[in-house]
Every structure is written in structure tokens, then in C-alpha cells.
Image (cartoon, grey):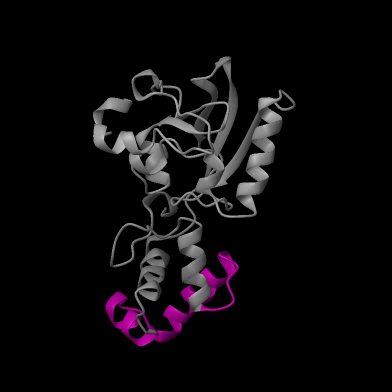
């Protein structure tokens, strides 16, 4: 597990020491680091004090992007509003934990990764809440290797004829797989299929040409 010091440059850290709603940020030298059992640490104002590489990877972010930001600010409404209310109840000890399901880009959608937030065993200004990314044991790959190649081609803008040639299928075979993908991802057309695939983390958001995330391929 990485530590706060190994990738966070001093010049960028200074940017995150001021202007957090009038509440002083925790000084850099006193910020905690995540343990092997944690993926993030929040202060009482829900600001992120440290995060694991896996957490940063899910949000396609660096430490400079997230350290000092409130966790709900990483999400879009209405998820951000719901999460802020849930964190407030969690901090008041009304819940023992709260969670949001994440895709590879950090969006709250049905996906095989869940962000679980709990009160720290001994809450303090530098460790009020702790985060953990959890992958349910029941999660299973959703696509065959061939269906994944078809989805990648659709995302790249390939026509059915071009996909048929490249994948050694008939056009009817390509259309069969496209129809199955539309049904599986509950999308009405190819454009929505690609958008939903990115939103759910089926397609990687960090590369071109499009690639299906390994965990979604059987």
C-alpha cells in the first residue's frame, strides 16, 4: 500500500492547505496515511486526507486531485447530495456504515465494486471516517471474449460489415451480438450502449482504441 509521501509533491500539497470553506486543512506533516485495510481516510468535514492507489485508480485521479476535497464532491448530483446526507448521519452515529457502488471512473452505478465508509474505531480530527473498496464475491464476468470484441468495435465506430470482416463473422452474427449487448446493458441503441458501457466501467476510460475491462470478460 502506498503512503502519502511517495507520490505527492510538496508544491502541489501547498495548494490544498487553504480555502476549504473557511475550515483550516490538516497540516501536511500531520496527515495520516492509509493502512493495508483501508482505501481512504476522511476528516470530520468529509475531506479526503489520504487515499490508496486503488481508490485513485477508480476515479482516474492523482493525490493532487483528491487530497483536501470533500468525498461527495467527487460524485455528480444527485449522488453527491445523497452521499453527503448519509455521511452526516454516519458521523452522528445514526448508521454503522454507508456505501455507494462504483464503476472504474468513480460513478455511482450498478457495478461489481462498492465503496464502503465506516466510522474510524477511535474517531479523531485526522481520522474520522475510513473508506474501503469491496468487491462482492458473487460478482462474475459478464461478457464472452467475442462479445467484448464486438463492443470494442462498436465503441470505436466500426460498422457491422467491418466488424464481420475483422472478427470472421457474418453480418447477422455481428447484429446478434450487438442485440445481446443492447439487452444486457439495457440500452436502446448503439450510442447509448457505448455511453452506458463507459458509465458502468465495462469499457476502460483510460485508453484508445476502446478496450473492455478485464474483469468483465469471462
Q: Residue at x 48, y 28 (%)?
A: 24
Q: Is residue 2 visible?
A: no
Q: Position of residue 195 (x, y in %)?
A: 49, 68
Q: Is residue 174 above or below residue 89?
A: below
Q: Which residues are magenta?
A: 160-189
Image position of 39 (left or right of 94) = left
- Compared to 78, does 192 lie above or below? below
Give the main secondary structure, helix, strand or loop, of the magenta stretch. helix
Query: What's the residue at 53%, 76% (across, down)?
Result: 179
Q: Is residue 184 magenta?
A: yes
Would you say 144 lies left or right of 139 here? left
Quick check: 157 above or below 102?
Answer: below
Say whether residue 93 is visible.
yes
Residue at figure coordinates x 59%, y 76% from the top left: 188
Q: Quadrant of residue 128?
A: top right
Q: Nearer the viewer, residue 206 or 157?
A: 206
> What residue is drawn where x is 53% and y is 35%?
22
Q: Position of residue 148 (x, y in %)?
A: 40, 64
Amino acid at each position: 500500500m502506498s503512503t502519502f509521501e511517495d507520490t505527492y509533491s510538496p508544491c502541489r500539497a501547498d495548494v490544498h492547505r487553504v480555502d476549504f470553506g473557511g475550515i483550516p486543512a490538516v497540516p501536511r506533516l500531520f496527515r495520516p496515511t492509509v493502512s493495508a485495510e483501508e482505501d481512504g481516510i476522511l476528516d470530520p468535514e468529509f475531506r479526503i486526507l489520504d487515499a490508496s492507489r486503488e481508490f485513485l485508480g477508480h476515479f482516474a485521479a492523482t493525490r493532487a486531485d483528491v487530497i483536501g476535497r470533500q468525498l461527495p464532491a467527487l460524485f455528480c448530483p444527485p449522488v453527491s447530495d445523497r452521499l453527503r446526507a448519509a455521511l452526516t448521519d454516519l458521523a452522528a452515529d445514526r448508521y454503522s456504515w454507508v456505501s455507494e457502488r462504483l464503476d472504474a471512473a468513480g460513478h455511482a452505478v450498478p457495478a461489481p465494486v462498492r465503496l464502503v465508509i465506516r466510522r474510524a474505531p477511535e474517531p479523531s480530527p485526522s481520522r474520522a471516517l475510513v473508506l474501503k473498496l469491496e468487491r462482492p464475491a458473487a460478482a462474475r464476468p459478464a461478457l464472452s471474449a467475442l462479445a467484448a470484441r464486438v463492443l470494442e468495435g462498436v465503441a470505436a465506430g466500426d460498422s457491422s460489415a467491418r466488424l464481420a470482416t475483422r472478427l470472421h463473422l457474418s453480418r447477422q452474427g455481428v447484429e446478434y451480438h450487438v442485440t445481446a449487448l443492447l439487452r444486457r446493458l439495457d440500452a436502446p441503441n448503439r450510442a447509448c450502449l457505448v455511453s452506458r458501457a463507459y458509465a458502468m466501467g465495462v469499457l476502460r476510460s483510460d485508453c484508445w482504441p476502446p478496450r473492455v475491462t478485464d474483469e468483465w470478460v469471462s
